[in-house]
Image (cartoon, rainbow, N blue to C red):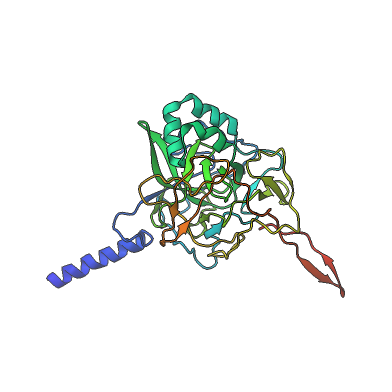
Amino acid sequence: MLAGAVLVVGLGVALGVVATGGSGGSSAQAVEMQPVAASGQKPFTDSVANGTASASASPSGSGPGGSASAPGASGSSGASGGTVDGGQPGLYGGTREVASCDVPKLSGYLAANTDKAKAWAGVEGIDSSQIDGYLHGLTPVVLRQDTRVTNHGYQSGQATPYQAVLQSGTAVLVDSQGVPRVRCACGNPLTPPSGTGGAYTGPAWSSFHPDGVVTVQPAAAPVNQIVLVDQATGRQFDRPVGGTGGNDGSASPSASGSGSSGSHSGTGPPSGASSSAPSSGGSSAPSSGGPGSPGHSGSSGSPGGGAGSGSAPGASSGGASGHASSAGASAGASKAAGSGTP
């Protein structure tokens, strides 16, 4: 009788681990699914997203239902998820000469709400007096894949971290190593995710699949240009780090990308190395700041124990981003083919 009870308990524990994506416990951390325009938990601000610059994506269908298992760090074969390199050309999208986020509006709001500013700055590892300069060193982009992050709401004078998946099409601000730092629909500060397990909750969108979720690994070095994909034309273009669209230019075929490389852990357009995440249950500051972001400090470790280095967005080192061109043969003669979109 005792042996039978032990067997039942053991089976229940095993099933619990499977149901929670192998998180190692019977109580998995919740991972909130956040559609493009949703404000999410306890937002810091009203939306500062430019609706004309973000994709017209909205939740539809039931997706995985009330919850679904979060993917592992390496994704799965045949899926486009896993870890991706923040410097990969075409990882993010946007609209040429249009910013997806109103940086001055966000900066002004935080300047007028000092309690929120202090909590917000603490997440990013800076002093509240440095927020304006920090924000103007970030780059407005649009996610092209569902992306796992640690989001931070605001409650009772404190930033409240929680795990979230942001829908493809969400407007964010990224730093000079391609790491999402702000969600524009709510003004919330972002840091890399904590772990990879958990159970998805909240409204799902029809295109969602757990194995399609990506985690952004910081680029090996800061970059000067970010290669984006124009949502209207599908063509790539360069946006200077910290630029808001006015200085966008055509991506050079001879450009070498961001200066970082790696293979995507699943399959699909972007490539990357290992995931970077802060410690569980707390807010994490971006890693070693570069020029243009005084006071920026902290580091984020990967779930597997490796260290990923973040950087202040104002850094100017790193090569220009670009994309490769391909050639195709035709009737015994070859001619240059157009560049592809990741």
Name the side, left or right, on which 198 lies relative to 272: left
Residue 72: percent from the left, percent from the top? 44, 62
Q: Is residue 41 above or below residue 321?
A: above
Q: Measuring 72% from the left and 57% from the top, which residue is drawn there? A: 255
Q: Measuring 67% from the left and 44% from the top, which residue is drawn there? A: 240
Residue 99: percent from the left, percent from the top? 65, 38
Residue 127: percent from the left, percent from the top? 46, 35
Instruction: Identify the image quadrant of the N terminus.
Output: bottom left
Name the side, left or right, on which 260 lies relative to 308: right
Q: Is residue 166 visible?
A: yes
Q: Is residue 41 visible?
A: no
Residue 189: percent from the left, percent from the top? 48, 40
Snapshot quadrant of residue 326 = bottom right
Snapshot quadrant of residue 115 = top left
Question: Which residue of the protein is positioned furthest toward the left in this rendering?
Answer: 1
Q: Nearer the viewer, residue 150 or 107?
A: 107
Question: Which residue of the protein is positioned furthest toward the top in this rendering?
Answer: 112
Q: Measuring 59% from the left and 34% from the top, which residue is drawn there? A: 103
Instruction: Identify the image quadrant of the C terminus.
Output: bottom right
Q: Measuring 49% from the left and 29% from the top, which residue is drawn there? A: 110
How many marks on residues?
Answer: 0
